[in-house]
Image (spheres, rainbow, N blue to C red):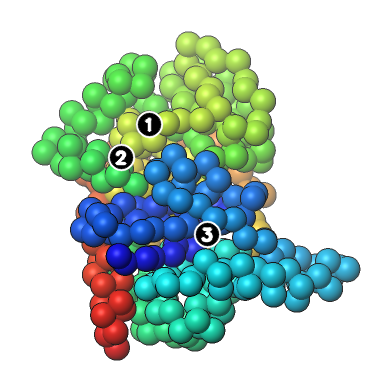
Amino acid sequence: MTRIVFAGGGTAGHVEPALAVARQWKKAHPDSELIFLGTSSGLENRLVPEAGFALTLITKVRISRKISPSLLAIPFSLFRSISQVYQVLKNADLLVGFGGYVSGPAYIAARIRRVPIVIHEANARPGIANQLGALFTQHTAIAYPVSKGKLSHALLAGLPLRPDVDSAFHSAESDWEKARSDAKVRIGFAPAKPLIFIFGGSQGSVAINSVIAGAKNQLGANGYQILHSVGSSNQLPESDSNYKAVSYISDMASAYLAADLIISRSGAVSCSEINTLGRYALFIPLPVGNGEQELNAMSLVAESRAEIVAQRDFTSSWLTENISRLLKLSQKASTAGSRKDLEASSKMVALMEFAIAGGK
């Protein structure tokens, strides 16, 4: 029996592509044993069991962005994590890493165990963990072209999609206009009025939510409908005839299809799903990290299907002043979605098969 360990914990940007690849692998190799690595604080604690896969938790290696006493604990927590992954990798045929806290220790443990490694990098600017892992393997894949480093030679596979997004694309491609109109009705909105869909990730964004709170009355008065996913950790505002607030959206595919304008962060998964099903987006990149969120959105901007605004400039007054212009840009954008990432999971499975077979 083939035994594969997936390291893709932390955020949805790491977990969702890993799950998509695992599902695709299971279709092709139903007798395989698949195990996910995670930490006690990551989204994988909900998403992985819901998808029907086994999850093993390891110690999280916390690396502070500032000089602090916590830096002294890094060697100890790193050693503990590597030791834990080393045990999980016993009799494993392959480690597949997607970046994040879990992947760094996993790559080191796999190197010690001499377990083949496959890496997928979702962001336009690779993270530290995947840059480290790329030193140990030639079996690498990327969602966006990378200009330098070992990952610049990786397979341009795209970003593996969730099954609902993939299915929605294939259902819509015969008639995108009808699919978008039907989706708007399906989620409870009038098909003839513009719909703005706002979300800030599974936990929501306080910064984005506060801007919408200050603008929603004016937007509603101007005849715009709003679907606002505020995030499970934030207080739910009161809805009205034009404004619908929810904590979490289970049918994201329909929301993407229905929206005339999407307002969101530009994480790798969000950009990929919006590219596949969305029409036009306003991205507010997260103002922390290594700048990867702005880079993630650049290809959509280049295709006239998105605009980027810095969080410091994204205010309620800016939104009300620019909303009409943004919706006109949306009307000019293509009604159809993009096929760019539809084969990403299959490409990853092929790369995994190649690595297990000892390909170089």
Spatial CA span between label 3 and label 1: 26 Å
**Pointer 2 or 1: first along the chain:** 2
Q: Which residue is mark 2?
A: 164
- The reply, left or right, for residue 346 in relation to residue 161 is left
Residue 44: x percent and y percent?
A: 52, 49
Q: Secondary structure at mark 1?
A: loop
**In the image shown, does 262 or 150 lie closer to the viewer?**
150
- Which residue extends farthest left? 174
Tell me if residue 342 comes above or below residue 49 in the rendering.
Answer: below
Give the alpha-carbon distance from disc 2 to disc 1, as whole Å.
8 Å
Which label belongs to residue 251? 1
Q: Residue at x 67, y 25 (%)?
A: 235
**Residue shown at 47%/16% (left/top)?**
242
Please tell me which of labels 3 and 1 falls first in the chain. 3
Q: Of residues 138 and 291, which is closer to you in this image?
A: 138
Q: Are marks 2 and 1 in contact (CB under 8 Å)?
A: yes
Q: Which residue shows up at 66% across the image and 31% down it?
A: 234
Quadrant position of residue 83: bottom right
What residue is disc 3 on?
37
Q: Quadrant of the C terminus?
A: bottom left
Mark 3: give few (<14), some (14-19) or many (20+) Cα within 10 Å.
Answer: many
The image quadrant that residue 187 belongs to is top left
Q: Residue furthest right?
A: 69
**Which numbered marker is on residue 165?**
none
Label 2, residues with CA under 10 Å away: few <14, some 14-19, many ≥20: few
Question: Type of residue at label 2?
Answer: Asp
Front-most of residues 193 and 174: 174
